[in-house]
């Protein structure tokens, strides 16, 4: 059987989809190649910005040039959004949208012939009517010399959720990402993601517990939970019996006898919540550390904040998308919170976890953004205890309301604002790093030791999401305690103190 290679672009969710695609090919007997020289090359694309589209097109040209005999299969969000645009590119053999990604390997190996798919699929409606014609067929267009087979249908008609744990090759056997939710029911005016990933859908608790336990059995020490709109996990699932209590063992050391700690209603049933899922994972698995990826501000409930703050088994890390601190801009973005709501959430998180990493996504150059509105964002970032930022320059996405808004901000102005916020974020991160000099931190070792002019060191990541250069040679995939001695090149530098015993704050404070 031919070999395959999957190249992923974009977010953790896309990487999780790519891992599931690899499972599909392996179940059909194909072997994984380590490069784009495979017989089948799958490009799993992103479309969140124009630059993401450009990266995908560049990859198609590169693969076609370096491996002209390969079958190039383009899937993912860009394929869902603009299938005809991609199918016209030289070298592309199949375009398979997110709607059909759950059967990508089967479709690919059948050579692009029509494959009966279960259920009723509604034809994909145009996202940008003047930019591309409707599909000739709800599942694929006719195969011609310049039009390759297309498998795309209305993503909102689908209930499948595709995901598998993602293993970073650089950090094997340490920090897999597990996608547990896909899609989004929000309609932010700048965002194309709901139209290419569909409605919010969640993995059931049993499936998640099985995946986490499988990872723990395989030797993984930290699991990162991710999703497109992670905090909305469970809202599409049926209500179930309410739990009477979750014991302290769930919050602290795996294997301890449980005693009542947190209570939920004793009778009736309720919809599962993200916080209830976290409690269940802690109670029913022995995972040593859970890390939560991005959660929208309105989903950082008091219950979730308290839970993350109280359990040593949950990484002290909160990523809370902000986008803007201007009330007028947030309204034009159709975001569901106001600046004062956002400020309150960040202050509550910081009060509960003073040493937590707190990050945010921020967008500059949104249509109509005035200098005064930008300054509102800059001032709030300056005031709040952020430790890092992901700053994006607005990119119009075809089919979104914002793309047709008046007063588009000139690119040079937006880039200047981007630079201002990146410089501010760098200064805040450096201040945060320096605050740990002379203190101890929990960290997980990531890979084998390296050597530089200062001797051996081991790369590690702290519980609160800081890079650590640990002096000496240490085996990967171990939680330990290190004392920070200095800050160098955007990372902590420290020495080994002892093993991390997972006994909670009291035990760790004794080391400090």
Image (cartoon, rainbow, N blue to C red):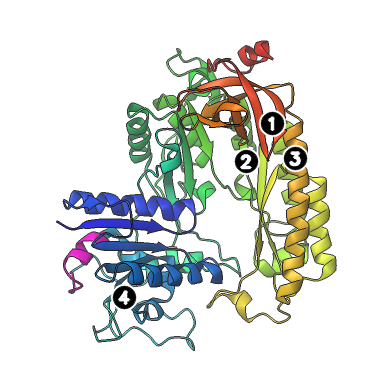
Q: Judge whether residue 82 can be spotted in this image.
A: yes
Q: Write the start and end of the magenta stretch as one range.
A: 103-115
Q: Residues within 10 Å of mark 1 (few under 14, many from 20)?
A: some
Mark 2 vs mark 1, CA separation in Å: 10 Å
Disc number placed over residue 91 in the picture, else none: 4
Q: Toward which corner of the image does residue 496 lie, by quadrant?
A: top right
Q: Reading the chain from its start, which is encountered first: label 3 or label 2?
A: 2
Disc number placed over residue 353 in the picture, else none: 1
Task: Look at the image and tell me in which quarter the N terminus lies.
Answer: bottom left
Disc number placed over residue 500 in the picture, else none: none
Report the residue marked by disc 2.
Answer: 318
Residue 387 or 319: which is nearer the viewer? 387
Q: Could you tell me which secondary element the residue under label 2 belongs to?
A: strand
Q: Residue at x 60, y 76 (%)?
A: 401
Relative to 460, residue 120 above or below: below
Q: Could you tell me which secondary element the residue under label 3 belongs to?
A: helix
The image shows residue 106 at horizontal and vertical percentages of: 20, 61
Q: Residues within 10 Å of mark 4 (few under 14, many from 20)?
A: many
Q: Judge whether residue 316 can be spotted in this image.
A: no
Q: Are marks 3 and 2 in contact (CB under 8 Å)?
A: no
| Residue 114 falls inside the magenta stretch | yes
Mark 3 vs mark 1, CA separation in Å: 19 Å
Q: Nearer the viewer, mark 1 or mark 4?
A: 4
Mark 3 vs mark 2, CA separation in Å: 18 Å
């Amino acid at each position: 059987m031919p070999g395959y290679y999957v190249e992923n672009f974009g977010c953790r969710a896309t990487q999780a989809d790519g891992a599931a695609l690899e499972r599909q090919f392996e179940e059909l007997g194909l072997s994984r190649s380590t490069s784009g020289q495979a017989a089948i090359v799958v490009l799993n694309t992103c479309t969140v910005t124009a630059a993401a589209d450009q990266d995908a097109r560049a990859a198609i040209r590169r693969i076609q040039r370096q491996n002209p005999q390969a079958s190039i299969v383009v899937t993912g969000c860009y394929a869902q959004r603009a299938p005809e645009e991609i199918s016209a590119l030289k070298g592309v053999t199949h375009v398979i949208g997110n709607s059909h990604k759950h059967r990508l390997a089967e479709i690919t190996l059948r050579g692009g012939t029509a494959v009966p798919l279960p259920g009723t699929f509604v034809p994909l409606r145009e996202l940008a009517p003047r930019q591309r014609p409707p599909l000739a067929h709800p599942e694929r267009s006719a195969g011609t010399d310049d039009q390759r087979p297309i498998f795309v249908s209305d993503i909102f008609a689908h209930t499948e959720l595709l995901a598998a744990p993602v293993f970073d090759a650089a950090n094997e056997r340490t920090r897999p990402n597990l996608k547990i939710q896909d899609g989004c029911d929000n309609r932010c005016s700048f965002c194309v993601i709901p139209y290419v990933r569909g409605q919010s859908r969640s993995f059931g608790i049993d499936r998640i517990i099985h995946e986490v336990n499988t990872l723990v059995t395989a030797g993984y020490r930290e699991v990162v939970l991710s999703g497109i709109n992670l905090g909305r996990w469970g809202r599409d699932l049926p209500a179930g019996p309410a739990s009477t209590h979750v014991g302290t063992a769930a919050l602290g050391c795996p294997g301890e006898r449980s005693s009542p700690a947190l209570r939920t209603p004793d009778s009736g049933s309720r919809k599962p919540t993200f916080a209830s899922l976290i409690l269940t994972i802690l109670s029913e698995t022995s995972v040593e550390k859970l890390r939560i990826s991005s959660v929208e501000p309105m989903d950082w409930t008091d219950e979730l904040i308290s839970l993350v703050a109280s359990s040593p088994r949950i990484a002290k890390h909160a990523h809370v998308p902000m986008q803007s601190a201007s009330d007028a801009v947030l309204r034009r973005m159709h975001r569901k919170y106001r600046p004062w709501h956002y400020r309150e959430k960040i202050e509550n998180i910081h009060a509960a976890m003073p040493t937590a990493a707190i990050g945010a996504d921020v967008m500059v150059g949104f249509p109509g953004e005035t200098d005064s509105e930008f300054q509102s964002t800059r001032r709030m970032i300056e005031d709040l205890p952020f430790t890092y930022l992901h700053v994006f320059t607005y990119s119009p996405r075809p089919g979104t309301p914002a793309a047709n808004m008046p007063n588009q901000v000139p690119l040079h102005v937006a880039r200047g604002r981007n630079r201002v916020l990146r410089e501010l974020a760098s200064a805040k991160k450096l201040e945060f790093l320096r605050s740990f000099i002379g203190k101890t931190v929990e960290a997980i070792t990531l890979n084998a030791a390296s050597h530089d002019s200062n001797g051996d060191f081991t790369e590690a990541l702290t519980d609160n999401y800081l890079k650590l250069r640990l002096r000496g040679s240490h085996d990967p995939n171990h939680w330990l305690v290190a004392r920070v001695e200095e800050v160098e090149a955007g990372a902590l530098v420290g020495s080994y103190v002892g093993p991390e015993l997972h006994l909670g704050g009291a035990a760790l404070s004794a080391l400090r």
